Image (cartoon, rainbow, N blue to C red):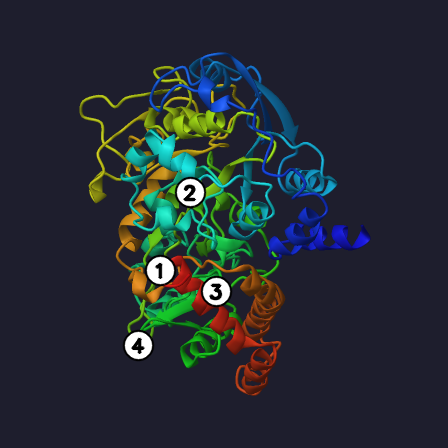
């Protein structure tokens, strides 16, 4: 048992989840002989589109991962709506927030005992959902989609990603979940840069468009007291060490396309990595030069978003001229200082490159019917109903005409300039403790244009306003799909190899990036040794495996 817990620990600190699932499920995953369905349970279910879902009331045992913003699942108004439209009684087993909740679920699987009939809100990864299905823990739903789906076929047609249905499939051809699909135009292009335009105005400078102009602006920020407080306290550029707040990721895209995740590109159908290319090396030289000249916050690899915000807001005037982050995470929503900042387009580098990473929003495995479901047809129909437009909106915004309303004449959407008409006006703020909805914990389909149709809020400090402005600047700067690896799908054997290769390689790349930028390794003297180490770690085999997964995700390979 010690071995199993060790593997689970690796899963929970971010390595490939299938490493833990294989050993854990082996203890108790295949002992049911095909599930716990009540014989004849389908006869109690009304046809697709007919409500209530079941003729005679049933109880469904729901394992759900707690959302800290939800007051009480049992008394929640959405729960009551589900119970009424389904003729259900929902019995909740509440799992802890985050990784502890996933850990508890996997331990239950390993123990071989009775599971909740449906697992909701766990965000199972592609690898883990495949293993849960492969071991008989998650039911394959292909026939359910064929025979019982009503809303899904309608709503999936509205999704902008034409590959979404393909992406829902595991490598064995089965679909093991009912998805959460939440498309937002602002989130597709969410590595955002924010320039203090008040500082530009104070110094008579223009918004930079090239890497050379950016350096000139940062030098002026360093030397010419742009915040006008008489002190040399300005930090020209900052960022943080979390995902979409990485300054180095933003700047690398001025030299070579950098997806920020696994740093993959596609050339003529062949997958490759960027971190052994001359353009990547040139990006490191540029960023290192900015660091050496005191133009970048020297804590970019150790500070989080909260720490960056504390620096920006440390005085009555702003102290950082440019930063990368989700704006809401870098400046307090109540702080009028945020009005000084506006989005900056990705900079053109020496060869004219100015990419922005495209971050696809795929299907999340948030509703999984387990081997112990007594009424799987009814549970699937409940999941299908949750993907209806009305239920999807309720799951995010709350009760119609109370927590949100339809737009009034003359109101515009946040993304009006991009062609999206207004769809709704939130009344209940997002992220507060409430008892109206499930905070999109379960399945839903919120296609592009639905959330983007939120009306322009009255509050000028709303983070949605600058994010919408940024999206207008960035949306045409992502490379075409033929140049990107948006998704991979791997077989069991490929996963086993990638489990050994990918975390080690990615960790080495991230560590080396920081060392090169900070000057602790020489970009000139140590580059060849860096490349040799990547090759020694199995980079070429990793690329081969990724190529196979890329082709399978596109349906080009079985």
Q: Earlier in the sequence, mark 2 or mark 1?
A: 2
Lateral position of residue 5 relative to residue 491, left or right: right
Q: From where the camera sits, is residue 147 visible?
A: yes
Q: Residues within 10 Å of mark 1 (few under 14, many from 20)?
A: many
Contact between marks 3 and 4 (CB within 8 A): the answer is no
* Marks 1 and 3, how far apart at CA: 13 Å
The quadrant in which residue 323 appears is bottom left
Question: What residue do we see at 46% from left, 36% from top?
Answer: 333
| Residue 231, percent from left and from top | 52, 56
Mark nearest the camera among 2 and 3 is 3
Above or below, 27 relative to 274: above
* Marks 3 and 4, how far apart at CA: 18 Å
* Marks 1 and 4, how far apart at CA: 15 Å
Question: What residue do we see at 36% from left, 56% from top?
Answer: 358
Q: Residue beneath label 2, please? A: 338
Q: Earlier in the sequence, mark 2 or mark 3?
A: 3
Above or below, 538 relative to 232: below
Q: Residue beneath label 3, please? A: 248
Q: Which residue is at the far right? A: 2
Mark nearest the camera among 1 and 4 is 1
Mark nearest the camera among 4 and 2 is 4
Q: Residue beneath label 4, please? A: 351
Q: In front here: 258 or 540?
A: 540
Q: Residue beneath label 1, please? A: 356
Could you say whether the residue bearing mark 4 is in a helix, strand or loop?
A: loop
| Residue 72, percent from left and from top | 58, 20
The quadrant in which residue 552 appears is bottom left
Above or below, 484 relative to 151: below
């Amino acid at each position: 048992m010690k071995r199993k817990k060790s593997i689970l620990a690796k899963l929970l600190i971010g390595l490939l989840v299938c490493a833990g699932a294989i050993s854990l499920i082996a203890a108790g995953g295949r002992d049911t002989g095909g599930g716990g369905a009540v014989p004849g349970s389908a006869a109690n279910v009304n046809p697709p589109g007919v409500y209530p879902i079941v003729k005679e009331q049933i109880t469904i045992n729901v394992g759900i991962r707690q959302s800290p913003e939800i007051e009480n699942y049992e008394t929640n108004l959405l729960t009551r709506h589900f119970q009424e439209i389904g003729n259900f009684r929902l019995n909740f087993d509440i799992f802890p927030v985050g990784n502890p909740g996933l850990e508890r679920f996997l331990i239950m699987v390993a123990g071989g005992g009775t599971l909740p009939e449906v697992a909701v809100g766990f965000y199972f990864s592609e690898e883990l959902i495949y293993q849960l299905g492969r071991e008989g823990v998650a039911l394959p739903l292909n026939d359910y989609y064929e025979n019982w789906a009503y809303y899904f076929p309608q709503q999936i047609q509205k999704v902008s990603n034409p590959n979404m249905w393909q992406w829902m499939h595991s490598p064995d051809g089965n679909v093991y979940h009912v998805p959460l699909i939440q498309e937002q135009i602002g989130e597709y292009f969410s590595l955002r840069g924010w320039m203090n335009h008040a500082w530009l105005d104070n110094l008579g400078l223009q918004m930079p468009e090239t890497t050379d102009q950016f350096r000139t602006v940062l030098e002026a920020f360093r030397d010419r007291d742009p915040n006008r407080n008489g002190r040399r306290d300005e930090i020209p550029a900052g960022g943080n060490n979390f995902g979409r707040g990485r300054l180095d990721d933003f700047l690398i895209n001025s030299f070579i396309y950098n997806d920020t995740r696994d740093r993959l590109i596609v050339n003529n159908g062949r997958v490759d990595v960027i971190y052994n290319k001359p353009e990547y090396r040139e990006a490191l030289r540029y960023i290192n030069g900015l660091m050496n000249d005191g133009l970048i916050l020297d804590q970019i690899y150790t500070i989080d978003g909260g720490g960056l915000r504390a620096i920006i807001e440390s005085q009555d005037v702003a102290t950082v001229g440019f930063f990368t982050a989700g704006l809401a995470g870098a400046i307090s929503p109540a702080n009028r200082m945020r009005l000084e900042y506006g989005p900056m387009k990705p900079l053109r580098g020496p060869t004219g490159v100015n990419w922005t990473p495209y971050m696809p929003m795929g299907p999340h495995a948030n509703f999984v019917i387990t081997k112990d479901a007594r009424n799987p047809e009814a549970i699937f129909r409940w999941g299908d109903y949750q993907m209806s437009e009305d239920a999807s909106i309720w799951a995010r915004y709350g009760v119609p005409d109370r927590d949100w309303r339809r737009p009034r004449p003359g109101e515009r959407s946040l993304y009006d300039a991009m062609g999206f008409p207004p769809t709704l006006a939130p009344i209940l703020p997002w992220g507060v403790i409430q008892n109206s909805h499930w905070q999109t914990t379960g399945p839903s389909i919120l296609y592009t244009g639905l959330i983007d149709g939120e009306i322009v809020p009255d509050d000028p400090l709303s983070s949605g306003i600058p994010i919408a402005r940024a999206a207008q600047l960035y949306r045409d700067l992502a490379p075409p799909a033929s140049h990107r690896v948006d998704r991979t799908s791997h077989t069991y054997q490929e996963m086993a190899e990638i489990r050994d290769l990918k975390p080690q390689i990615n960790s080495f790349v991230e560590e080396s990036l920081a060392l090169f930028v900070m000057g602790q390794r020489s970009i000139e003297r140590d580059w060849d040794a860096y490349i040799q180490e990547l090759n020694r770690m199995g980079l070429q085999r990793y690329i081969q495996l990724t190529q196979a997964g890329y082709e399978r995700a596109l349906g080009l390979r079985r």
